């Protein structure tokens, strides 16, 4: 006959209890097993700051699409694709011969205009002398004054054309507007490029970088409440700390500060956008990388902490084993909070200093079982007892 599953799982514990009963009554069974050795740690009470966790993406602070400002044939590419460039570095050159010729023509026009100004001034001075002795009419004097003004205006126009021609020559040399990492060259030498339309390359800043993420409405309201109470400043007014970890990293080894919270929630998703700034001197972060983000969620408060290894699950309940009098274990249901510094906050169910089983829970078959406890620090649940302690 097949026993129900709950009865099958209880057979080892019932057999152990039967063996103990026979031995207590003087039966001929084997002696009882010695208490199982387990590691226990005292529930830690210490000030903690809770951190809320989000998923985010690394973004460049500045992104520049390099496009030509004059038309022409691309003459050369001066950078290593995918490499770092500094602000002002030469990246592309466009064939500038026709622009240099235009600049020379504009200089000649300026020189011609200067000559016309000198001639107009000379004619005006002669007319003023003749008018002083009544040898020239007032109309002639006004004509000479007008010619000088026209010559000055023509010279200003020629100078403006020269400046435009010189700018066109400058625009044939495309330099980096920011420091950062450049992508591939989208156009090769010999191809015709058009102003404002041809994409030459993309340049992104690399240090520092942003990590962008979104928070839900519940957390936003919590932060607003904390700001009103004064227990935690709003990230709009203060550079609250963040911690960041990449997909290949354990924990959150990188530190940054909040720099932006959007002015409204997205009604479609019920979330609000935010971003933090991270230093990137060693080049760890590349725009587009997935990142795990922790944002300081509350002010400092006292909390009870236990190791994750101590927590067991019974359907929808979380519980731990606590060593009580006579080294017998007691089951205690607990309510849990977030992770803090490798430990887990306990919001209800335990008291500070209680001894919790952190290693060896599989050796415990039922509450009331006697154990041989070995006390370890809460953050070192797998610490091995010395041989003398293990043999007792």
Image (cartoon, rainbow, N blue to C red):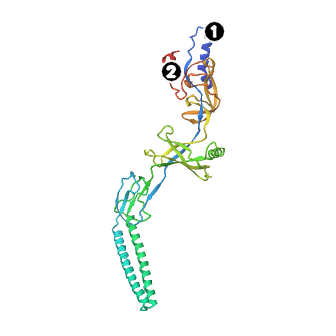
In this rendering, would 274 be left or right of 66?
Answer: right
**Mark 2–mark 1 contact, CB under 8 Å?**
no
Q: From the image, tell me which residue sits under label 2.
A: 385
Q: From the image, tell me which residue sits under label 1.
A: 25
Q: Choose between 289 and 222: the one closer to the eye.
A: 222
Secondary-structure class at tag 2 = loop
Q: Nearer the viewer, mark 2 or mark 1?
A: 2
Of the numbered discs in the image, which one, if any, rests on residue 392? none
Picture residue at 50% right of the left edge, 16% below the top: 388
Q: Choose between 208 and 195: the one closer to the eye.
A: 208
In this rendering, would 8 be left or right of 210?
Answer: right
- 210 above or below 171? above
- 109 above or below 350? below
Secondary-structure class at tag 1 = loop
Q: Residues within 10 Å of mark 1 (few under 14, many from 20)?
A: few
Q: Choose between 117 and 54: the one closer to the eye.
A: 117
Residue 377's image quarter?
top right
Residue 330's image quarter?
top right
Specify the quadrant that holds the N terminus: top right
Q: How many marks?
A: 2
Q: Position of residue 148 (x, y in %)?
A: 42, 81
Q: Position of residue 117 (x, y in %)?
A: 39, 79
Q: Position of residue 35 (x, y in %)?
A: 57, 17
Residue 18's image quarter?
top right
Camera sees residue 2:
no
For the residues marked 2 and 1, what is the alpha-carbon distance in whole angstroms?
35 Å
Camera sees residue 162:
yes
Tell which circle, 2 or 1, labels the residue nearer the N-terminal end: 1
Q: Residues within 10 Å of mark 2 (few under 14, many from 20)?
A: some
Q: Position of residue 353 (x, y in %)?
A: 61, 26
* Farthest residue, direction front: 133
């Amino acid at each position: 006959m097949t026993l129900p599953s709950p009865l099958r799982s209880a057979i080892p514990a019932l057999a152990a209890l039967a063996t103990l009963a026979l031995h207590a009554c003087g039966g001929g069974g084997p002696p009882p097993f010695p208490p199982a050795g387990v590691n226990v740690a005292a529930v830690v009470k210490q000030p903690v700051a809770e951190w809320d966790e989000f998923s985010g993406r690394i973004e460049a602070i500045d992104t520049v699409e390099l496009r030509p400002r004059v038309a022409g044939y691309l003459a050369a590419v001066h950078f290593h694709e995918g490499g770092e460039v500094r602000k002002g570095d030469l990246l592309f050159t466009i064939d500038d011969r026709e622009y240099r010729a235009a600049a020379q023509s504009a200089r000649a026009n300026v020189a011609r205009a200067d000559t016309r100004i000198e001639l107009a001034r000379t004619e005006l001075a002669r007319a003023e002398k003749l008018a002083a002795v009544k040898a020239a009419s007032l109309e002639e004097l006004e004509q000479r004054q007008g010619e000088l003004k026209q010559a000055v205006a023509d010279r200003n126009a020629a100078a403006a054309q020269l400046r435009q021609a010189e700018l066109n020559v400058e625009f044939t040399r495309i330099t980096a507007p920011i420091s950062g990492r450049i992508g591939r060259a989208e156009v090769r030498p010999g191809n015709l490029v058009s102003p404002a339309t041809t994409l030459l390359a993309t340049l992104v800043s690399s240090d520092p970088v942003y990590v962008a993420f979104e928070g839900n409405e519940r957390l936003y309201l919590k932060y607003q409440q904390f700001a009103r109470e004064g227990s935690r400043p709003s990230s709009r007014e203060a550079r609250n700390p963040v911690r960041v970890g990449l997909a290949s990293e354990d924990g959150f080894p990188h530190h940054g500060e909040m720099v932006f919270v959007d002015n409204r929630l997205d009604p479609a998703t019920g979330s609000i956008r935010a971003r933090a700034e991270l230093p990137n001197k060693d080049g760890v972060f590349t725009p587009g990388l997935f990142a795990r983000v922790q944002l300081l969620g509350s002010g400092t408060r006292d909390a009870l902490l236990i190791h994750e290894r101590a927590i067991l699950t019974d359907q929808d309940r979380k519980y731990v084993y606590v060593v009580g009098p006579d080294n017998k274990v007691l089951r205690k249901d607990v309510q849990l909070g977030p992770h803090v510094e490798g430990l887990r906050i306990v919001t209800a169910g335990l008291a500070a200093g209680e001894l919790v089983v952190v290693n060896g829970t599989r050796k415990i078959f039922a509450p009331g079982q006697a154990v041989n406890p070995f006390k370890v620090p809460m953050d070192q649940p797998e610490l091995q007892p010395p041989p003398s302690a293990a043999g007792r």
